[in-house]
Amino acid sequence: MDATPLAIGGVPLVGLQEVSEEDAKATFKKLCASFRISENVGDWLVETVGLRTLEDYSAFITSEAEIEAKITSKIANLAQSGLQAARLRQAWLAIRVAGTQAQEAKKRGDESLDLEALLPLHDLKQLDALFHQRYKLQLEVQVAPSDALVSSLAKQLDRRMLQVQSVFKVKTLRHSLLTTRKRRKLGSIEIVDAEEAIDEPISENVSNYLELLQVLLYGLAKAGVRPLEKQPAEPEGPNTRSTAYVQVPLDVVLRYHRRAARCVKLAPPSAALTWLQQRDERERQLWVERFRFSNLPLGQIIEQTMLELDHAWEIVPSDDLSATSANEKSEKTPKSPSKIGKLAAKLKDGTRLCSDWNQGGCAERCQKKLTHACSYIIKENGRVCGMRNHRACNHKSKSAS
């Protein structure tokens, strides 16, 4: 017999694998249980029709109208045949949709669905063991990254497909313990039920941002805890760089977090979150770009990028982050209110001026809805300055320049 495989245009055809009747019955038993179809319907499809897989069922029925003609009308004494036909239609549609999605994902090389899937339990336990062995650290559920986050990050590292995570969407292990996701395997097709999660509202503020950023960084450290293939001959010690030994060292990502927590304290409270978020996302974007287009471990990229962008974090932000001029950056420290001189409450046309802003306080948008303009009273003519590019506490330095 000719052993040459069947092919079309040089492309080999993938034939059907042999499936025993026992395995086929187990598959259709799961299908019937999932869609509440009578078990004897599944047995009939296997024993009488000869179906072996869910793909067989999908191909056996070419339209919803055929279900009654080909199945329910053929089974003797079938109770509630109309209801059974309806559920068979639901099962057939679900299989067709799942098959179409799988083909489309394979065609465009889209691995996003796979990135969201959990790692096998063995792999997750191995990462936990390596993390504990290296750092001797047991994270509490409130700060530990969820298994889904660790799984996704581990796959992103393995495939060099790192993504910029949204910090406020990061989930902790505590969140995953309050979440149930049911998975059912039907033959070669996995059906994932919708999550039933208890989503606690998160206030978008600096404190929560830093907490969730730390969770994300813990996730990177756990996902990247495996040792590098090429390591220095010298054993790792106090005088060696951790980035030469593991993919993402914990000390490096925590150093990144400490810098963010320290520098954001310099920002005005009203603008601190925006200031922090912009710098953090910009730096993590560079991690992604450099990781995807190089062969360097992520830990080394993080360390290198931190050195390059350190200056961007150390700049003291002004009250108005969106419109800081060169002159404002060079202004002297604001004078105390007692040394400013006489201030006006309003302009000549009656426009009310913000006293807090003129003395170095108030946010970019005045909570009192007053005008941000210099209220300094010029001694020579008694006129109110009224300029909007400086405060009364900086009036002298402005006029001198």
Image (tube, helix red, strand yellow):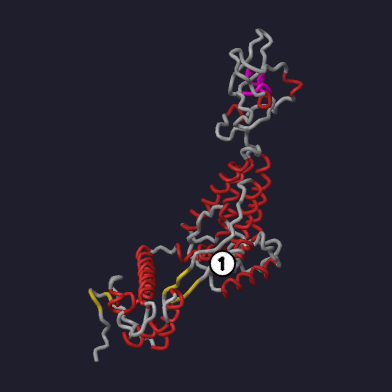
Which residue does the image show at 55% across and 56% down from the upper left?
301
Q: Position of residue 222 (x, y in %)?
A: 61, 65
Main SS of the magenta part reads: helix
User: Which quarter of the figure has residue 186?
Assistant: bottom left
Farthest top residue?
381
Q: If the image is split into quadrants, where does the C terminus sit?
A: top right
Q: Position of residue 246 (x, y in %)?
A: 60, 65
| In the rendered image, the vertical position of residue 270 relative to residue 106, given as above or below | above
| In the rendered image, the vertical position of residue 315 relative to residue 159, given as above or below | above
Q: Position of residue 244 (x, y in %)?
A: 60, 63
Is residue 392 highlighted in magenta? yes
* Mark 1 surroundings: few (<14), some (14-19) or many (≥20) residues within 10 A: few
**Callout 1: SS:** loop
Q: If the image is split into quadrants, where does the N terminus sit?
A: bottom left
| In the rendered image, the vertical position of residue 60 relative to residue 400, given as above or below | below
Compare residues 380 and 28 and report the one nearer the observer: 28
What residue is shown with label 1? 180
Which residue does the image show at 64% across and 48% down from the upper left?
260
Compare residues 395 and 327 and report the one nearer the observer: 395
Horizontal side of 370 relative to 104 (left or right) equals right
Which residue range is magenta in the image? 390-401
